Amino acid sequence: MRILHITNHVQKIGNGIVNVAVDLACLQAKKGLDVAVASAGGEYETLLANHGIHHFQLNQSRTPVSILKAAWRYREIIKEFQPDIVHGHMMTGVLLAGILRNNHEYSLVSTVHNEFQRSAIFMGLADRVIAVSHAVADSMIRRGIPAKKIRVVANGTLGSPRHRKMEDYQPLKLHHPAITTVAGMYTRKGIGELIEAFRLIAQDFPQAHLYLVGDGPDRAIFETMVQNSGRIRQRIHFEGFQPEPQRYMLSTDIFVLASHCESFGLVLTEAREAGCAIVASDVDGIPETLDHRQAGILVPAKDSQTLANALAQLLSDRKQLQNWKFRAKQNLERFSATRVSEETLTIYRELTRKYNAINTIKNREFVVGK
């Protein structure tokens, strides 16, 4: 089986979609399959090469000239690599692969991560649409994607070839109790609500500190919020993007993901592995990631007061805090990157068997007609 993965890039910038694609490519190559990746490139090219994976340069910038060049380049890649499966992880790649395949010369698979985006509907061009949670699957069906196309493969990156084992990271020295989030600095990630929740509890818990790990276009908005928060601004730390966020998680008491929408919440699996007590929004795929309240506390999205109440409850009860830390580390096997790879390969095999059967029928019809 020859597999081509398409992503916008393979940069090491904390993009969960790229991380999952790189994991799949590496683990599939490790099983002896012929694997290639097409993207605009990035730091993970070295890792891919170390796994024997060929990287094809493919710039998918969304300008008319770039798209025309990408279409030409894509056809060159297909002619050279001749894949059985093309797996698109982002919308532009799926559009290229769907529109430009001739007579179904390969089977097309897409993975839907950000189903809340309008463009996610184009992922339905694929023969099989992988949803990273049941919540995503339900959403895509409501948007008109046939249920027979959809397969749920829950996300997971534990044991990823991209990084070391959790126990091999050196924890950072943080102020305690430490409340941390690892997320892009976007409004939809609930950073503003988290800052407000911390402001609400700061006076009652003067030793607590908040660590915001990540970067993004809305960071200046959140920095302004903190500057206007009086004396507590010295206890809120903007840490920027960190290539090893595990070092923060290992020193964290309470991990928070206050997203307004979240297809799965991959970072929660890493926070669970690190043994953090977790508070997260009760939206989309997050309840699945937290074993439906068994591994973390769920609160309504966009509700700073309820989030503050949950934080205060944990900070005021050491026994309860330790209990949630223990519960977070249970039942982690299902989040392994290897499991994701195996379930994805099952979908590939389903398609290649169907493709081979169709070709056999066509060949027979050709012989009879001749």
Image: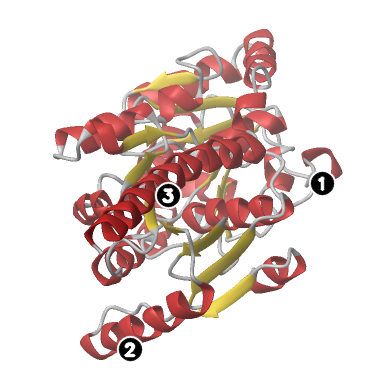
CA distance for labels 2 and 3: 32 Å
Q: Quadrant of the N terminus?
A: bottom right
Of callouts 2 and 1, the N-terminal one: 2
Kind of residue indicated by mark 2 = Lys
Numbered disc 1: secondary structure: loop
CA distance for labels 1 and 3: 46 Å
Q: Quadrant of the C terminus?
A: bottom left
Q: Residue at x 31, y 81 (%)?
A: 71
Name the mark nearer the viewer: 2 or 3. 3
Kind of residue indicated by mark 1 = Tyr
**Residue in front for this viewpoint, 140 or 359:** 359
**Residue in front for this viewpoint, 63 or 105:** 105
Question: Which residue is tagged 1?
Answer: 169
**Mark 2 touches mark 3? (CB < 8 Å):** no
Of callouts 1 and 3, the N-terminal one: 1
CA distance for labels 2 and 1: 43 Å
Indicate the position of residue 346 as horizontal and vertical percent values: 52, 37
Q: Is residue 65 left or right of residue 42?
A: left
Kind of residue indicated by mark 3 = Asn
Indicate the position of residue 75 as horizontal and vertical percent values: 37, 80
Question: Which residue is tagged 2?
Answer: 69
Indicate the position of residue 322 as horizontal and vertical percent values: 69, 15
Q: Residue at x 66, y 11 (%)?
A: 323
Q: Residue at x 23, y 38 (%)?
A: 140
Q: Is residue 302 visible?
A: no
Of callouts 2 and 3, the N-terminal one: 2
Numbered disc 2: secondary structure: helix
Q: Is residue 190 left or right of residue 183?
A: left
Question: Which residue is tagged 3?
Answer: 356
Q: Is residue 369 visible?
A: yes
